[in-house]
Amino acid sequence: MLRFDLLATEGQARRGRLTLNHGVVETPIFMPVGTYGTVKGVLPQSLHTMGAQIILGNTFHLWLRPGLDVIGQFKGLHGFEGWHKPILTDSGGFQVWSLGGADGKGRKISEEGVRFASPVNGDKLFLTPEVSMQVQTVLDSDIVMQFDECTPYQTAGQLTTEAQARASMELSLRWARRCQAEFARLENRNALFGIVQGGMFEHLRQESLDALVAMDFPGYAIGGVSVGEPKDEMLRIMAHTPHRLPAHKPRYLMGVGTPEDLVEGVACGVDMFDCVMPTRNARNGHLFTRFGDLKIRNARHKTDARPIDETCTCEACGSGVSRAYLHHLDRCGEMLGPMLTSIHNLHFYLQLMREMRDALDAGRFAAWRAQFHTDRARGV
């Protein structure tokens, strides 16, 4: 079940409400990534406190560990991980791409699916559109992603050609039809999204989009970005595709990105985002603030009594945790350090989305966007 209500617009930017089987999601929204059924280092209660409305699970990794038998005993991922709000699961296509290695030889792609070795124990695996739908049905995620081939920007140092991008895009379209058929056969009660591919070629993106729209998915994602391309290329595709998707259905930009990317994505008509950046960067001492980025490992923070961001109300900043203390935790390798910084970064991202929703409700998104860029440029 999926219902999308468009509540307000300003230019291409949209304010919406997405109703799913496990709850309501106010858009635009950022979705924290929980690869193995957990957002690394963050308690579910902290996710609730910071306003997370929907999180991601990783089909590929959960298929391998703990496996479908275990998750099935809990009647899906919600019961297994104790998260009772909406969940989106990816299809496994991105992991197949990333496991292929720089030369792409770690996998064998055919019309039927993809063969590769398990990164856990080396077992030979075969992932197909049908298997992806079967796995995601057991996971019972509110939003199911079609199985696709994530078109690389380059392979073994060679840029993907138009012919290669077309072949990849057309394969993903054929797989999309198989996903729809299997999703229907399984009588999955949730929502299946199609994924627009086409590499860095706008006309291929349009062909993919047109074919997927004709298939009438409940929602659409833009895939194949943030795969090693230069930022200006990503921004070009981000500007091209979202507003061409149906206005009455949700639009999801996969794997993006920085705070600036999210703001510009919303300006281009995107409703949903996910990225490992806030938590991955947090574990490496890279923190996001209203006034620019902060590297907590820098020696200048050793005696700094200020919070990460004096305008932030997250559990770290609001409880008086200092930059000096976080610097100390990082230097000592204490697990509390990345837990606190992950909470801060995710809170910052979710607060960013909240402010954009409020600005769209008030008809002042353009002014908010200009102030955001001014603040971020100021520096910490």
Image (tube, helix red, strand yellow):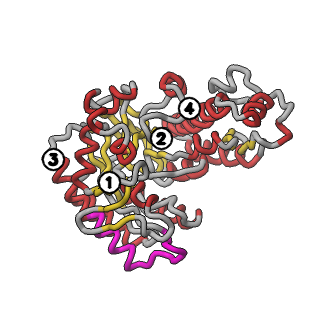
Q: Residues within 10 Å of mark 2 (few under 14, many from 20)?
A: many
Q: Earlier in the sequence, mark 3 or mark 2?
A: 2
Q: Quadrant of the C terminus?
A: top right
Q: How far is the residue under mark 4 from the one under mark 3?
A: 36 Å
For the record, the magenta segment spans: 153-173
Percent x, y of residue 74: 29, 27
The residue singled out by tag 2 in the image is 33
Query: Mark 2 is on which residue type?
Result: Val
The residue at 53%/35% (across/down) is 40
155 in magenta = yes
97 lies above or below 251: below
* Label disc, if present, on residue 288 of the rendered structure: none
Residue 243 visible at all: no
Please tell me which of labels 3 and 1 falls first in the chain: 3
Circles 3, 1 touching at the beta carbon (< 8 Å): no
Find numbered disc 2 in the image and state the secondary structure of the residue it sits on. strand
Q: Which mark is residue 184?
A: 3
Residue 245 on image: x %, y %: 35, 56
Residue wearing tag 1: 246
Image location (x, y in percent) of residue 244: 37, 60
Give x and y (percent) for residue 333.
70, 35
Q: Dots 3 and 2: beta carbons under 8 Å?
A: no
> Could you classify mark 4 by the number of other residues whose Cα lies within 10 Å: few (under 14), some (14-19), or many (20 or more)?
some
Toward the top, the furthest residue is: 319
The residue under label 4 is 41
Q: CA distance from mark 3 to mark 1?
A: 22 Å
From the viewer's perspective, is residue 361 above or below residue 222?
above
- The span from disc 2 to disc 4 (Cα, nearest Å) is 12 Å
**Neighbour tally class for label 1: few under 14, some 14-19, many 20 plus, Cα within 10 Å:** some
The kind of residue on which mark 3 rests is: Ala
Identity of the residue drawn at 28% across and 57% down: 126
